[in-house]
């Protein structure tokens, strides 16, 4: 019995033999059934962006050889960037502050608020030229 266990431990059986097939079967059972019955405490790493912002980009054609895009920015992101200020200059600066890391140096043509069914501002559409 000890000799058989030692042979299993050192994997001394030749391929195609009965004992080799038993070892391979045990390994495959462990690989496929182990996670179901054994808690290995493996969990995905929680990664949360410090400043998560979602920006939707749509192509809007071209003007005078320049590419034109429409960026839709969530109102929450704008409010964080403006820190509550609502003047036109502050909104323009906040929109550029959010878009420029994504698109590089751009020109803001105009922007419009996007409202939900209740009339609350949920996002801003910004027309940008590169």
Image: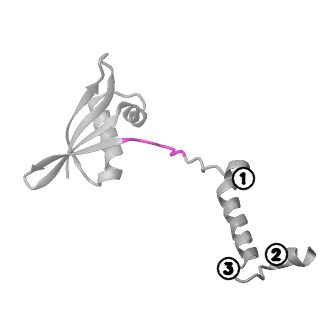
Please give the label number shown on residue 16: 3
In 3D space, how far apart are the residues under numbered discs 3 and 2 (Cα atoms)? Answer: 17 Å
User: According to the image, label 2 marks what residue?
Assistant: 9
Find residue 45 and report its horizontal and vertical position in percent. Answer: 60, 50
Give SS at disc 2.
Answer: helix
Q: Residue lying at the far top in this picture: please name it.
A: 118
Disc 2: CA contacts within 10 A as few (<14), some (14-19) or many (>=20): few
Q: Are marks 3 and 2 in contact (CB under 8 Å)?
A: no
Q: Is residue 40 left or right of residue 111?
A: right
Q: Is residue 85 left or right of residue 125?
A: right
In terms of depth relative to the viewer, which is nearer, 91 or 99? Answer: 99
Mark nearest the camera among 3 and 1 is: 3
Q: What residue do we see at 86% from left, 76% from top?
A: 4
In 3D space, how far apart are the residues under numbered discs 2 and 1 (Cα atoms)? Answer: 23 Å
User: According to the image, label 1 marks what residue?
Assistant: 40
Please give the label number shown on residue 91: none
Residue 89 visible to an observer of this rendering: no
């Amino acid at each position: 019995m000890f000799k058989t266990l030692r042979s299993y431990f050192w994997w001394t059986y030749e391929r195609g033999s009965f004992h080799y097939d038993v070892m391979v079967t045990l390994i495959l059972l462990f690989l496929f059934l182990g996670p179901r019955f054994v808690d290995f405490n493996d969990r995905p790493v929680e990664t949360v962006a410090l400043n998560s912002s979602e920006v939707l980009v749509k192509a809007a054609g071209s003007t005078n050889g320049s590419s034109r895009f429409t960026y839709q920015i969530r109102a929450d992101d704008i409010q964080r960037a403006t820190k509550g200020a609502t003047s036109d200059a502050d909104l323009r600066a906040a929109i550029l502050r959010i878009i420029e890391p994504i698109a590089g140096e751009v020109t803001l043509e105009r922007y419009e608020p996007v409202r939900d069914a209740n009339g609350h501002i949920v996002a801003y559409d910004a027309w940008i030229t590169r």
